[in-house]
Structure formats: C-alpha cells, structure tokens
Image (spheres, grey):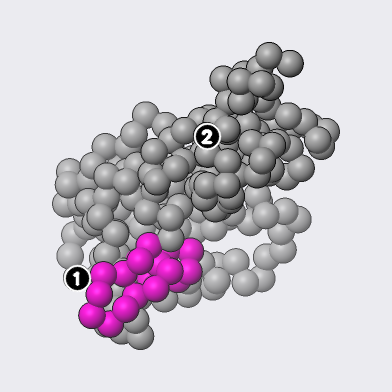
Amino acid sequence: TKMYEFFGGVTQMLYVDNLKTGVIKHPKNEDPVLNQSYKEMAEYYNTAIVPAKPRTPKAKPSVEGTVGKVTTHIIARLRNQKFSSIKLLNEAIKECLDEFNTQPFQKKDSCRKEVYFDEELPFMLPLPFKPFEYSNWKTVTLPYNYHIAHEFNYYSVPYEFIQHSLDVRITKSLIEVFYKGHRVCTHQRLYGKKGQYSTKQDHMPPNHQKS
C-alpha cells in the first residue's frame, strides 16, 4: 500500500517473492496459492500477482541489482549517523532515496526519476479513492450461542448458521462473516473493555427474540 502511494499509481502486474506474506505454496506444475489477505489486496487494486519461480533469482534480475545499489548508497550515507527514533531514520532514508533517484545516469542525459515519470507512470493504473485496509482472516464454527469471539468480545451471526464453518474477515474497523463466499453479517469492531457483545435482534432464534 505504501509502495503504491509512493509510485502515485498501481502496477498492472506485481512480481513477488515466494514469501509466506504473499504466497502460501507454489506447486511445481500448478498455480500458486496466494495468502488470503494478499489476494484481497490484489483484487482491491485490480492488479495481477505473478510469483517468481522458487529459488530462481534471475526471474527479476534488474530488481535484485537495483536493490543492492540502493542499499549500498543509503548505508554509505548514513553509516556514521545516529538516530533517536525510527521516524527520524525513515526521514533520512527518504532523503537518500530521493538523492539516488535524481542522480544523473553515467551514459545518458536523464535520471531514474525522469525515466519513471516519462516511461512508466503513464502505464500505471490510478490509485483508488482510499488505500487498501489490511485484514486478517480466520475460520470458526458458530457455537450454540450464535456469537463468534474475537479478542474477548462477541459478535452475533444469524442462528441458522449454528455449527457451520464460517470465514471471518477482521479489519481495524469491521468484523465481517462469510459462509461459502457470501457475506452473512457485518459488525463494527468493538474496542475498550473485554466481554462486550454486539448482538442484532434478527440474528436471534424466535424464542430468544420473544424473551
């Protein structure tokens, strides 16, 4: 998300390493299996995820080479400095990165920043109105009290799904519950004291609604 904000646009394709943050497994003769949150991010930005082949660094040699050059440039500039906070360190790194991107090429009249704006940015997809909100997923079986638990707070689900397996999407602001890919309910996430309940009346069995 921060990368796309820095670029000012979205890449049409995203080549990724086979890290667990993005790719759960990459079978030899089958399509890779993406982490659910990573897949959701790709769908939100309308970009295609293309995992590099395992143990094949030559799949993205220009990236690997540039990472080394950037790292060397920044470490050389900052190796003798001390920082009292991560914020100050990140600000210094950003200054070094801007310097790196505006350095003239040795063999042509241009720099990395100019090449990006002239040759790459026109092919980027526009940023969405809001940045992607990261989510965690978990699978639960709905108990007989028709409430699912998250961080010691409880959220109701229609009682018809008791003893069914449900997928729960958790963001900073929402708790969403899905059954076989269909969303069955949404709650505002509860914060503060433990043991709070978010219960919707239409989720209750008829005998509970009467009482």
| Dot placed on the residue nearer the N-terminal end, 2 or 1 | 1
Task: Please tell me which residue lies in front, 55 or 173.
Answer: 173
Among all residues in the image, which is located at the extreme bottom?
Answer: 55
Quarter holding residue 115: bottom left
Quarter holding residue 162: top right
Task: Determine whether 152 is above or below 108 in the image.
Answer: above
Alpha carbon of mark 2 to alpha carbon of mark 1: how far? Answer: 69 Å
Estimate the x, y position of residue 207 in percent, counting from the top left: 66, 21
Task: Determine whether 177 is above or below 55 in the image.
Answer: above
Task: Determine whether 64 is above or below 112 in the image.
Answer: below
Q: Secondary structure at mark 2?
A: helix
Q: Is residue 159 left or right of residue 149?
A: left
In the image, which is nearer the foreground, mark 2 or mark 1? 2
Q: Secondary structure at mark 1?
A: loop
Estimate the x, y position of residue 73 in percent, counting from the top left: 47, 70
At label 2, which amino acid type do we have?
A: Glu
Estimate the x, y position of residue 205 in percent, counting from the top left: 61, 25
Instruction: Please name the residue that numbered disc 2 is placed on.
Output: 160
Q: Is residue 202 left or right of residue 28?
A: right
Among all residues in the image, which is located at the extreme front?
Answer: 207
Residue 33 belongs to the span the image colors magenta: yes
Residue 12 belongs to the span the image colors magenta: no
Instruction: Please name the residue that numbered disc 1 is placed on.
Output: 107
Region rendered in magenta: 16-34
Residue drawn 57% across the image and 32% down it: 159
Residue drawn 81% across the image and 37% down it: 194
At label 1, which amino acid type do we have?
A: Lys
Residue drawn 35% across the image and 66% down it: 33
SS majority, magenta: loop
